[in-house]
Amino acid sequence: MTTIYILFYISFFILFYNYAGYGLLLFVLIKIKRLFAGKNPQTGIFEPAVTLIIAAYNEEDFIAEKIANTLALDYPAGKLQLLFITDGSTDRTPDIIAQYPSIQLLHQPGRNGKTAALNRAMQQVTTPVVIFCDANTLLNKEAIRNIVKHYADENTGGVAGEKKVISEDISGAAATEGIYWKYESFLKKLDAELYTVVGAAGELFSIRTALFQPVEEKVILDDFVISLRINISGFRIAYAPDAYAMEAPSYSIEEEHKRKVRISAGGFQAILMLKSLLNFFRYPVVSFQYISHRVLRWTLSPLSLPVLLISNIILVLGGAGIFFYLSLSVQLFFYLGALIGYQQAKQHIKSKLFYIPFYFLFMNLAVYQGFFRFLAKNQSPAWDKAKRNIA
């Protein structure tokens, strides 16, 4: 039974550390860091020339609103270049963009994926800073300013913006997706204060143009790979919570499932591509953050869930103490809540109480599916326009 006890405690520790312990440890480390850190120097107005790249695929229903939002951004017009790339779009998206002379449009009929489109767009960039933004998001007016101010620090090679899930639906899937991103934002804030954000989200992020490395066209998570290669180059990714991209939640649980599986497949691909970041001796702080925040979530955490449950059942059947009875009860209630949440999701019943355990298991099951899709190499790098609830 000793082996079963060991499996139970190891799986429990991995899950606790991944979803709570890492955040607590960051909090403590940052408190210690603040004891020895000096005050951040105040900087004046910093307005480098910027190119904003927006990749759009079949967004004719939303692109006019996106353009209006982009043209309203608060930044000197002479220092902001707008570049939309619509490769592969088969609707009126390129035609709508072409009506605006202040916007540079890149379009070709062939669809080779978002990564290929971004590589092509980067060949047109002449400004020292480039910002990437998704076409199905809206930015706050000060987003550009709030991103570029971080480049006053020469050690900053990139900046991660914020993602906000906006919906009139405050319960069910929309609320749970929002809770997840709030938790991610909390970890980003702590990560950035310790040293660096670990992988920027494609909704809104920026890099120094000189640090861009063309991304292999089969890469699934282009934003993740681009930003972590900034870390490999010896620079940090800053966090700009006051620069945010607003996005509607997924249209349905099926759409969210598709997205999660794709992200998981891309995560395994990225772990192999960025294996040098697993070297603690070469990248001590970045490796610690990368493994704790990302690698564990895509590898050991999903495996720990069944190990924890099965080992707990064996220990209870073997007459283990009251602690194991309580832990098994908690797990069974959690899985029961997830099952109820799944049934409610199918029936479009809105209940945050049961949707949270369902969403948690839903994310971890998507990792398994993403892993098998990665092994089968049948995850296309081409991006599909996700259906979103437009409130």
Image: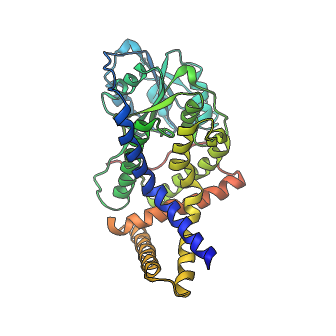
User: Farthest residue in the top direction?
Assistant: 78
> In x, y percent, where is residue 383?
57, 43
Q: Is residue 295 left or right of residue 322?
A: right
Compared to residue 82, the image places residue 115 above or below, namely below
> Residue 114 or 150: which is nearer the viewer?
150
> Residue 376 or 297: which is nearer the viewer?
297
Compared to residue 223, the image places residue 347 above or below, namely below
> In x, y percent, where is residue 202?
49, 38
Compared to residue 78, the image places residue 172 above or below, namely below
Residue at (31%, 25%) from the top-left corner?
72
Q: Quadrant of residue 340?
A: bottom left
> Residue 288 or 343: which is nearer the viewer?
288
Compared to residue 151, the image places residue 223 above or below, namely below
Q: Quadrant of residue 215?
A: top right
Looking at the rendered structure, the number of numbered marks drawn on it comes to 0
> In x, y percent, where is residue 64?
38, 33
Residue at (66%, 36%) from the top-left corner?
217
> In x, y percent, where is residue 384?
54, 45
Q: Is residue 195 left or right of residue 170?
A: right
> Residue 158 or 284: which is nearer the viewer?
284
User: Farthest residue in the front direction?
Assistant: 36
Residue at (37%, 30%) from the top-left corner?
37
